[in-house]
Amino acid sequence: MREYIPQKAKLIPKQAECKFRGELFDVYQWPQKLFDGSMSTFEMLKRDDTVVIVGILTPEEQSRLGKVSGTEDKVVITYQTQPHQDWFYDYPGGRHDDQEETELEAAKREMREETGLQFQNWRLMEVRQPFSKIDWLVYTFLATGLVEQCEQSLDAGEKVEVMEVTLSELLEYAAKPNAKHLLLNFMREIKSLDELKNLPALREY
């Protein structure tokens, strides 16, 4: 259940008919009137949306987790692998595949399952559509205010190691060839994690 949809998102129209349901992608088609009055069949793919979470831990919160905290805030990232994939660095996140959940509920669930961390404060920072021909939105959240930590609850096809890194370390990991999207668009000009926490948000919860 999507709560926030960007105005310029290109979505499958309501009159479209699903022609094929796959494990990852569904294929939809619909008749479309052209400028000369003739009709043509248009087609789009659809897949589950994705949620991405940038979690920030203060030095005090790091100490509560038994980590060596130092004096800087740190970002939670993962080092993970899946079947037929090499190990890679990424943020916690995953598929929004339960249509009873909102994107925020999916983000909280994925963060809890992959890292065991639960946060109080959530901000929606970015929503993008990677491909105009695919009805697929990627929601990126900023999470702060650690509540508690529990055990990871990983899928059978996941191996996930949780890491906490400073901003300078994050930039080093982002430059590695096996890093995925660690340097997000809205983070490219920031000079500190305090600045990141104060960036404008699309929605606050």
Image: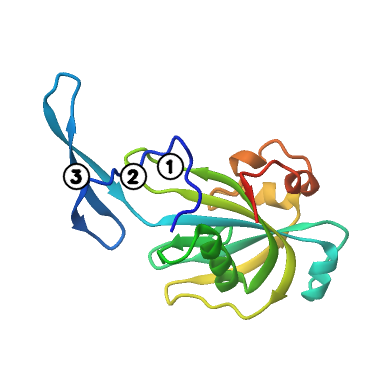
Residue 27, position in %: x, y?
Answer: 23, 50
What separation in Å lies between label 2 and label 3 (alpha carbons)? 12 Å
Say whether marks 2 and 1 touch (CB < 8 Å).
yes
- Disc 2 target residue: 134
Numbered circle sitting on residue 11: none
Residue 132 in the figure: left or right of residue 35 = right
- Asked if residue 157 is positioned above or below residue 181 in the image, the reply reads below
- Disc 3 target residue: 29
Residue 163, position in %: x, y?
Answer: 67, 65
- Asked if residue 109 is positioned above or below residue 196 in the image, the reply reads below
Mark 2 or 3 closer to N-term? Answer: 3
156 or 116: which is nearer to us? 116
Residue 11, position in %: x, y?
Answer: 35, 43
Number of numbered discs: 3
Mark 3 or 1 closer to N-term? Answer: 3
49 or 100: which is nearer to us? 100
Give the foreground label among 3 and 1: 3
> What residue is drawn where x is 53% and y is 61%?
93
The crowding category of the residue bearing disc 2, from other C-alpha atoms within 10 Å (few below 14, some 14 to 19, many at least 20), is some
135 or 159: which is nearer to us? 135
Say whether marks 3 and 1 touch (CB < 8 Å).
no
What separation in Å lies between label 3 and label 1 (alpha carbons)? 20 Å
What separation in Å lies between label 2 and label 1 (alpha carbons)? 8 Å
- Asked if residue 123 is positioned above or below residue 107 in the image, the reply reads above
Determine the residue located farthest toward the bottom in the rendered image. Answer: 151
Secondary element type, mark 1: loop
The crowding category of the residue bearing disc 1, from other C-alpha atoms within 10 Å (few below 14, some 14 to 19, many at least 20), is few
Instruction: Please state which amino acid type lies under the numbered disc 1.
Output: Pro
Splitting the image into 4 quarters, where does residue 144 fall? bottom right
Numbered circle sitting on residue 130: 1
Residue 74, position in %: x, y?
Answer: 76, 58
Does the rendering let one see residue 86? no
